[in-house]
Amino acid sequence: METTENLKVFIENSSIPWEDLGQGVKRKILAYDERLMVVKVEFEKGAVGVVHQHHHTQITHIDSGLFEVEINGDRKILKGGDAFFIPPNVMHGAVCLEPGILIDVFSPMREDFV
């Protein structure tokens, strides 16, 4: 079991570099342990989070912008302040209609991100 001595418990956004994923998308991993991960993702207008699935439960808060979100074939336009929930192994993706930022929370953490 990790203790707070080994974890970053205070997260300062300005101290975490962006990772450019290409095609108008970049992210920064804010914090994680083996059970939970928080990731900030920035989208330019027109950028696409391609439809995919994974075994993690995901909750996403839309910090800013406008997104067309697809979950299990259903689509809805969501804006800053809204959120969406994705159960494990459900197909999902998003198209950015106005530049914005998503805050993704995953359980367990996304090992493929680190």
Image (cartoon, rainbow, N blue to C red):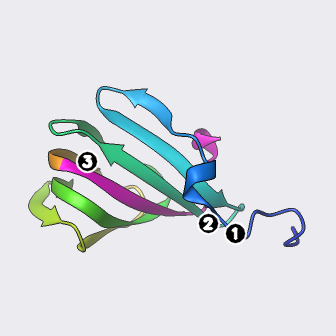
| Residue 11 locus on image (x, y percent) | 64, 64
Is residue 107 a member of the stretch shown in magenta? yes
Q: Residue at x 66, y 60 (%)?
A: 32
> How many numbered discs?
3
Q: Residue at x 43, y 30 (%)?
A: 21
Is residue 94 a member of the stretch shown in magenta? no
Horizontal relation, residue 8 to residue 65: left or right? right
Residue with the most extreme top position: 22
Span colored in magenta = 99-114
| Residue 94 locus on image (x, y percent) | 22, 48
- Disc nearest the viewer among 1 and 3: 1
Horizontal relation, residue 71 to residue 75: left or right? right
Q: Nearer the viewer, residue 58 or 102?
A: 102
Disc 1 versus disc 3: distance between alpha carbons?
30 Å
Would you call the spot at circle 3 few (<14 residues within 10 Å), some (14-19), or many (20 or more)? some
Q: Is residue 46 above or below residue 100?
A: above
| Residue 18 locus on image (x, y percent) | 51, 39
Q: Secondary structure at mark 1?
A: loop
Identify the amino acid type marked 3.
Gly
Disc 2 versus disc 3: distance between alpha carbons?
21 Å
Q: Earlier in the sequence, mark 2 or mark 1?
A: 1
Q: Is residue 83 above or below residue 6?
A: below
- Choose top left, top right, bottom left or bottom right for residue 31: bottom right
Q: Earlier in the sequence, mark 2 or mark 3?
A: 2
| Residue 44 locus on image (x, y percent) | 24, 39
Q: Earlier in the sequence, mark 1 or mark 3?
A: 1
Q: Which residue is mark 3?
A: 93
Identify the amino acid type marked 2.
Leu
- Residue 10 is tagged as 1
Disc 2 versus disc 1: distance between alpha carbons?
15 Å
- Disc nearest the viewer among 2 and 1: 1
Q: Which residue is mark 2?
A: 36
